[in-house]
Image (spheres, grey):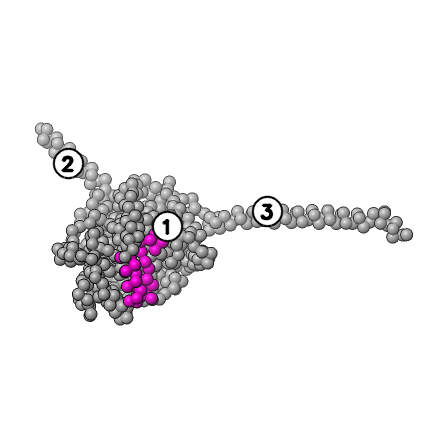
Amino acid sequence: MDTMRVLGLLLMLAFLDCSSGARILAIVPIPGRSHFIVFSSLARELAARGHQVTVMSAFPQKTPIANYTDISLADELGVLGSVNFFDFGSLNPVIMMLAMWGIGSTLCDTMLSQRVVRNLINSEKDQFDAVIVEAFFNECFYAFAHKFKAPLIQYSVFGGNLAVDDSVGNPTPYSHVPDPMLNYGDHMTFCERLKNTLFSLYSAAGRYLYYIPKLDAITRKHFNDSTLPYLGDLEKSTALLLVNNHVAVGFPRPLVPNYINVGGLHIKPSKKLPEDLQKFIDGARDGVIYFSMGSNLRSSHFPEEKRKALLETFASLKQKVLWKWEEDSLPGQPPNVRLGKWMPQADILAHKNVRLFITHGGLMSTQEAVYHGVPVIGIPVYGDQELNMVRAEAAGFGIQISYSNLSKEAISWAIQEIISQPRYKENAKRLSSIFRDNPQSPMDTAVYWTEYVIRHKGAPHLRSAALDLSWYQYHLLDVLAVLLGAVVLVLLVTAFVLRALYRKLFHKTKSSPKNKSKKRD
């Protein structure tokens, strides 16, 4: 009898546990693997904690995961392997932003047209307790939060920008918060502050006057819902903004309560390396240099002269080099260089023999380098990569080499500088300590706030009142206009009174009897 009671109690507890899980729709439609790696870390963890997670992405899981359901966009979107992202390095920030608006509009129209997405748009049986959307030119997918009457959670895989800040009413002082497209630090010169302000105003004006209206029309075409709010208003319903940022690799800035930094979310405890790779690094008496340009930039797309400069430099080193190279062979490969189409980057950086990481400066790579205390040489090409390397130089754990100036002389000097000067390694270790010193892990933080928003039905008490103000009210331009008007009025009244007094005194002096008698004499 006691055994039956115990079994019954266990069965009841099991059902209670299952019923407590939320139904979450996670959308990461950009077909970039680096974006998905970070985003999917949160999705898999939510599934592991008992939530039913449906993930719409171009990277479906190869093996089934409990509580994790794929809506695959792989056939429609593919992977960006054929695109040469080095071409983006020639675009200035203004053109780059225009290009991103165009790409965002095209991708939204394309993705919302796909059969699997339309099935979800037209579904009458699916229900979700929260909708998580990657904050990267995917605003059209906010409409799913309205459709399912669920809190909207945004997740930014990079350090955030004006657009994601505005979605939760977060202040963005142009005086010390640089736009990710610009390569400025938080202590800007007058000229830099001027350029940062002008570019930010251009981005805001273009986004709200051109991009969002265009995207709103595309969204309405596909959703065909007369109750759908304007996309700009729907964006302001964001209940939570999770940002892949950490003060150790960023700059301090003001944050509203529902803007949560979860930098390093994708970093996991180090695993043992494959045996052959372990042997290669263990046997490097002078250390190893790890070289990777990330998941979108392909080393095989390097122009001939830059590839030759890298090969000649690596051949002259006594260190071994691990190079993420996407082709089967590399002409002129030196004997101290080992190639790999894919490498367990974080696990490699965790090895004590790794002396240096040569990187494109992507945020996730920078975070992994800091987490493991490895100094970096950055070769930024586009986006926020240059800003990340500006931060690395400012923090003293990295050196930036302009892609346009990449040469044997430049890369050789940078390698010898970092390897021969202990301060780079010391600063990397210092920042690693700061990066790891958190009250709870980034993953636990992200999961806690996601569940918090679900528990509290969107947590409207976290919403900033700034979202209800017009742009001129937010910047106090109406107050400034009244104050200036009051000052002008006071000055006018003062001028009128002084003029009246002057005229009265001057007229009295001219018309006095004494003056008149003098004229008669």
Which three-letter amino acid code belongs to the residue tagged 3?
Ala
Q: How far apart are the two marked residues, 3 and 2, measured between alpha carbons?
A: 73 Å
Question: With 272 as the anchor, is 37 left or right in this view?
Answer: right
Does the segment drawn in magenta span residue 395? yes
Contact (Cβ within 8 Å) of mark 1 with mark 3: no
Residue 166: x and y in percent read 40, 51
Residue found at x 14% / y 56%: 279
Query: Looking at the rendering, which quadrant does residue 449 occupy?
Result: top left
- Please give the residue where the numbered disc 3 appears in the rendered image: 486
Residue found at x 12% / y 31%: 6
Residue 510 visible, this orientation: yes
Contact (Cβ within 8 Å) of mark 1 with mark 2: no
Does the segment drawn in magenta span residue 367? no
Which numbered marker is on residue 11?
2
Which numbered marker is on residue 251?
1
User: Does dot 3 land on a helix, a strand or a loop?
Assistant: helix
User: Does dot 2 land on a helix, a strand or a loop?
Assistant: helix
**Label 2 environment density (alpha carbons within 10 Å; few <14, some 14–19, many ≥20):** few
Residue 477: x and y in percent read 51, 50
User: Viewer-nearest of labels 3 and 2?
Assistant: 3
Marks 1 and 3, the one that precedes in the sequence: 1
Marks 1 and 2, the one that precedes in the sequence: 2
